[in-house]
Structures are given as C-alpha cells and as structure tokens.
Amino acid sequence: MAIKEETSKEDLFQEERIRAFEEIENRLEAIKKLLRQAKIETIKYYRENPSSYAVVKPTDLINDYIKDIETLLEK
C-alpha cells in the first residue's frame, strides 16, 4: 500500500497563484483578438466617415490600463 503525501496549504496556495498566470495569459490572447477586431471596425468606420472625429473605441483608456498592468508587473 503506497503512502499518499498530503499537499500542504502553502503548496496549494502557490499552485493556485501560478495557475492564475496561465489564466491571465489566456485572457490576453483573447484581448489581442478583440483589439484586432476593434482596429478593423475603426478603420471601416473612418473610411465610411472620412470627416469624423468620433472615438470609435476607447484606445486612450485601454492604453492607460495597459500601462497600469505594466507598472504592476515591473514592481
């Protein structure tokens, strides 16, 4: 009969924290696809409305959020 080692609370916590990075990476891949779609929509809109100053997608806000994420990761 094999003896089963118990996984410590610390190990479980650490595994969960590491798995969180995988989830974030997957979400970033999905965001990349959404960004490509948003760019295409924006190009289409401006071609159809060449004199427009409308903000089709909030790129300034998106850039601010990305800068915040970069700051968090660089600490």
Image (tube, rainbow, N blue to C red):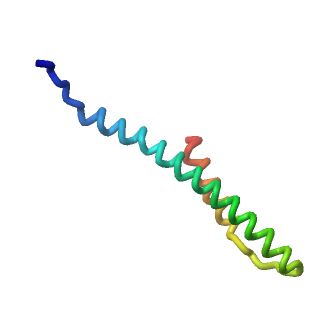
Q: Residue at x 23, y 31 (%)?
A: 7
- Image position, residue 45 (x, y; %): 78, 75
- Image position, residue 31 (x, y; %): 60, 56
**Furthest residue toward left:** 1
Q: Nearer the viewer, residue 72 or 12?
A: 12
Task: Point out the image quarter for the C terminus.
Answer: top right
Q: Residue at x 42, y 38 (%)?
A: 18
Kindly indicate the quadrant of the structure image that contains residue 13.
Answer: top left
- Image position, residue 52 (x, y; %): 84, 80
In this rendering, is residue 27 above or below 4?
below
In this rendering, is residue 49 above or below 37?
below
Drawn side of residue 2 relative to residue 70, left or right: left
Q: Residue at x 65, y 66 (%)?
A: 61
In this rendering, is residue 30 above or below 7?
below
Q: Nearer the viewer, residue 45 or 63?
A: 45
**Furthest residue toward front:** 1
Drawn side of residue 42 relative to residue 21, left or right: right
Kindly indicate the quadrant of the structure image that contains residue 55.
Answer: bottom right
Q: Residue at x 73, y 70 (%)?
A: 41
Drawn side of residue 46 relative to residue 19, left or right: right
- Image position, residue 9 (x, y; %): 24, 36
In this rendering, is residue 36 above or below 74?
below
Task: Point out the image quarter for the N terminus.
Answer: top left
